[in-house]
Image (cartoon, rainbow, N blue to C red):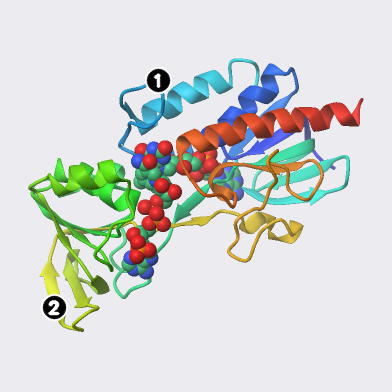
Amino acid sequence: MAEKTYDSIVIGAGPGGMTAALYLSRSNSSVLMIDRGVYGGQMNNTAEIENYPGFDSILGPDLAEKMYQSSTQFGAEYAFGTVTKIEDHGATKTVVTDMDTYETKSVIIATGAQYKKLGVAGEEEFGGRGVSYCAVCDGAFFRNKHVIVVGGGDSAVEEGTYLAGLAEKVTVLHRRDKLRAQQILQDRAFANEKINFKWFTEVQEILGDDKKVTGVRVVDNQTQEVSEIAADGVFIYVGINPISEPFLDLGITNEQGWIETNESMATKVPGIYALGDVREKELRQVTTAVGDGAIAGQSAYGYLQSLGD
Ligand code: FAD
Ligand code: NAP
């Protein structure tokens, strides 16, 4: 027997989920956001956001706080919990968390994405002892030290630049000789004297002593030459995976686990929508998550109306 009932449940309170909740609650339907962590999602791991219109630059956690205030102003509620399953019973759905069970008419999946691991020796062993996936969380431990950043995308280059404001030196290791990061981020990093790049370089192992990271063993994938680089920390930014494991039974994901939707953010299960980074899509940003959230909220509202009372 389900304990609590809402017209809609939004799973995940990142920028996308919070926007969907705003739209639904403004339409006067009852809505609950459930998140397994603090609202804000990946924005909490982002130093500065300077591509969200209306702000020249804003700290990720500050934008998260502002979005939370907007998203709850028309009555949307927030609950803590990890969603483990959605049961589809047609006109009603059951959302199961590790703490509660909820009954609802429509569900919006906004669970986003999480960092990929590099999968090399030493990565697990030195997690929290020099290996990190979050510069904003851990960068301050590396003041005036040498840190390695692995990857060539927006995250590696932007967070590497942030780390250069704290560390003495930042070395970015990339497996090709071209970055995939946005040009403005590349230009900024190339102009920063504290950042240097090593191209065609792959990490084989993260090295350490009995306490913490001491460096990395790398291979030049052109010459096959193996060498070691001494460093105090290793920040890994090699991409993201969708957080869709609890929804695999619904048959709404593709082979890589991204959720497939149409332009209305509808999955192939009536009444279940998905938005933001967890969707199969081209551009994963705060702006696009927010855009998806508005569409998903409006679509779910239309669905609720079609059910009648
Ligand atoms: P997310 O922000 O990922 O939020 C998903 C939420 O769902 C999380 O709060 C999570 O706790 C919750 N959740 C997951 N699983 C469950 C579950 N089972 N039960 C309950 N809750 C769950 N974009 C920009 O536009 N500008 C930038 O400057 C920028 N910088 C970035 C820097 C870094 C280091 C990273 C990693 C990303 C950056 N991005 C940036 C990308 C941007 O943060 C994401 O595109 C955006 O946050 C996606 O929003 P979302 O709502 O889809 O999901
Ligand atoms: P990404 O764009 O997928 O880039 C991952 C990088 O890691 C690529 O350069 C890739 O190399 C490299 N890589 C992947 N697997 C590797 C491995 N096994 N070994 C070594 N290198 C490996 O991921 P991201 O940079 O984390 O970005 C994720 C999303 O968030 C993107 O949509 C991005 O636009 C968004 N984001 C936006 C901003 C912003 O707007 N300011 C900031 C951060 C993130 P190749 O290039 O050779 O494939």
Q: Is residue 215 visible?
A: yes
Tell me the residue at 81%/40% (across/down): 2
Answer left or right for 141 relative to 169.
right
Answer left or right for 63 relative to 23.
left
Q: Earlier in the sequence, mark 2 or mark 1?
A: 1
Tell me the residue at 56%/35% (across/down): 16
Question: Which image quadrant is residue 99 in?
Answer: top right
Q: Locate residue 125, reporting x and y percent.
A: 31, 69
- The residue labelled by disc 2 is 227
Q: Nearer the viewer, residue 51 or 58?
A: 51
Callout in the foreground (2, 1) = 1
Q: Is residue 124 visible?
A: no
Q: Locate residue 155, reporting x and y percent.
A: 33, 49
Height in image: 185 above or below 213? above
- The residue labelled by disc 1 is 54
Q: Quadrant of the N terminus?
A: top right
Q: Locate residue 307, reporting x and y percent.
A: 89, 31
Question: Which image quadrant is residue 11 in?
Answer: top right
Q: Quadrant of the C terminus?
A: top right
Tell me the residue at 20%/66% (across/down): 199
Which amino acid type is marked by label 2?
Ser
Answer left or right for 213 relative to 7.
left
